[in-house]
Amino acid sequence: MEKITSVREWSVAIRINHWAMALSIFILIVTGLYIASPFTLAKGETVSKFFMGNVRYAHILFGVILLFLFIWRVYLAFFSRFHADWKDFLAWTNIKNFIHQIKFYLLITKEGPEYKTLYGPLQSLAYIGLLFMVFVICVTGLILMGAGYHTGFTYVAATILRPVENLLGGLAMIRYIHHIFTWFFILFIVVHIYMAFWYDAVLKKGTVSSMISGNIFKRVKE
Amino acid sequence: MAKGNHSDYKKMIDRQYKDLMKHCQEHMEQVEKNLPESTDDLHEMLRARGISRREFVKWTSAITAALMLPPIFRPMVAKAAENFSRLPIVWLHFAECTGCSEAFLRSSYPNVDDILLETISLEYHETLMAASGYQAEQNLEKAIHDFAGKFICVIEGALPRGLDGKYLTLGPKGKTGIQVAKEVTSKAAAVICIGSCSAFGNIQAANPNPTDSVSISKALGISTVNIAGCPPNSVNFTGTLLHYLMFGGLPALDSLGRPVWAYGKRIHDYCERRPHYDASEFVEEWGDAAALKGWCLYKVGCKGPYTYANCGKVRFNDGISWPIMAGHGCIGCTEPGFWDTMAPLEKPLPDKSYGGGEKTVDKIGIALTGVAAAGIAAHAVASAIRHRKDDRINTEEEKHD
Ligand code: HEM
Ligand code: SF4
């Protein structure tokens, strides 16, 4: 006899963090790509226009928000009172599961591996990759910010990061790396959204809605 | 800020400047005693070139401000300028085009900076000296010996390390550049690199760098003052020397050895076209209506946002103009490796292409996203077929629940 129950998977903090990050990253991609290849506003007087200025403002505002969301997420991974999930990021170390999972994704097997961790083996690797991407884009973003703003927190961060700037070849290279990582984010999002819906369709556990309600459905034997 | 705090703050600043002034005065007395007599009378030279006293005073104000000193230091700057010719200088040339010397010494309307540079006590300068061969060699040895620990070594040009340094040999004994540089710099009071070649390697060190050229600091493992630029502004050099004459030390340097007073901010921060950048008004191609209106050059490849330098503030040739004012974007010549990192020079950064073709980062990105989307579509269809008759939800059993 089987019964479907609803199990809490995500804490409120994780859910807020997830959607705030999603929104920030979306805005950052749109504004970032505008900064990289802007279109000209030919009409009107210069004094009455501030479009690039506003786009940069939004980008940097959400950039700093993303930075704090990143710090918060890493904090939760270690110190969350609901479920500190840092160990779950290591699910990929189980090689047998890892290969099994690939077979499942490639539709060779019909059932995925059993794992007790929050994330599957490939998922854990993808999310480590995502956190690394956020880290790199925040560091390069802070350096770019520091180049234009010479006070306070930004100045301190930029001073600490100056050796990184020099090592990577100056602001131009920092900007270029920032741009390349933008594409990594776009690719990640495309695959991430598809996989969420795929899980929903194949495993029928309510993966997509779980990030809103916090609960996932489980079949339990009675 | 409360008023009391404010006056305390002001007092503190006043005291700091007073201390600095005292230090400056003491040092300059020291200089009077230790350095050789002036070879040229600056004021006579200025008069001969038609530069009035008034203009000289104006210049001292400008330099004082540029060095971020308060106006009370103006007389000290003037004094240091008079003493300029007392500072012994040995000027070396390695792998370079002599463009920096040319830019400094041959401007058509010499200003005070240029004339100052003419008064410089060049104990040795390969382009300007009359001596050659063994005689030149002797001059160099004598200068290093006579002014050991006192002279400033100015270097133009990178050092090739390939073939044991033999891509560059100098003088009758065929010494390599690295040997000469080692001998001279080891006795110098300070080493000032003029131009991006000596500072960072510049075009000699650009990919693929067949001669393995590197900057002076990298070739010799010493720290240098880097007056970067291709060519740099003469003000950045004279200002640094004046600072040295006034305080007996080098000005604050950034992590790449560039004086902060000159290279502390970016071109983009000082640029007169910046309001057009913020207003999204860009030149789309050379000579279009936007170019005539003086709009921002970002989309025709301006590298001002990535380049630390004060060109827009001090300008070139007696403040007449500078590249962005003249209508071409900044190419980033004060940054290390700019031929590689700033390429393409007349297109925005993301237009850098791979394999000499049209493959830019955006085109690769779009292609990869397309591949991902196609892969997803195929996977979705395959999944639908494979998991069509999933027994995961057993309708039979569900009925019983
Ligand atoms: C997912 C996150 C992000 C994306 C997709 C993104 C994207 C971009 C892109 C495409 C550019 C233009 C680069 C170019 O010209 O080639 C840019 C510029 C910039 N980004 Fe980001 N960025 C992100 C996060 C951040 C963060 C976290 C910060 C700061 C903490 C930041 C600060 C900046 C700054 C300061 C610039 C330069 C703007 C200017 O100087 O005009 N970005 N970003
Ligand atoms: S012309 Fe160059 S330096 Fe000036 S505002 Fe435009 S991008 Fe910045």
Image (spheres, rainbow, N blue to C red):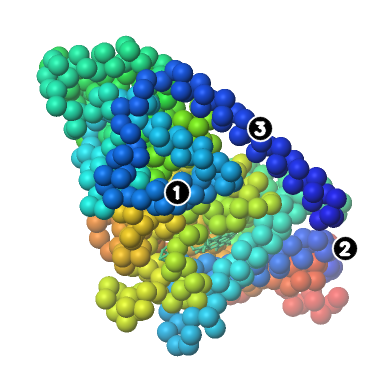
Residue at figure coordinates x 39%, y 40% from the top left: B237
Determine the secondary structure under disc 3. helix
Q: Identify the disc placed on residue B57.
A: 1
Residue B48: % across, % down: 26, 44
- Closer-to-camera residue (A74/B246): B246
Mark 1 in CB contact with mark 2 (< 8 angstroms)? no
What secondary structure is found at the residue carrying circle 2? loop
Q: Is residue A155 above or below residue B302?
A: above
What residue is at 54 percent from the left and 83 percent from the top? A48
Q: Which residue is mark 3?
A: B19
**Residue flagged by tag 2: what amino acid is it?**
Glu
- Cβ–Cβ under 8 Å for marks 3 and 2: no
In the rendered view, tell whether residue A19 sits above or below residue B178: below
Say which chain tag 2 marks.
A
Horizontal and vertical percent position of residue A81: 87, 51
Q: CA distance from mark 3 to mark 2?
A: 85 Å
| Chain for disc number 3 | B
Within the displayed image, which quadrant is ligand 2 positioned in? Answer: bottom left
Residue assigned mark 2? A222
Q: Nearer the viewer, mark 1 or mark 2?
A: 1
What is the number of the mark on residue A190?
A: none
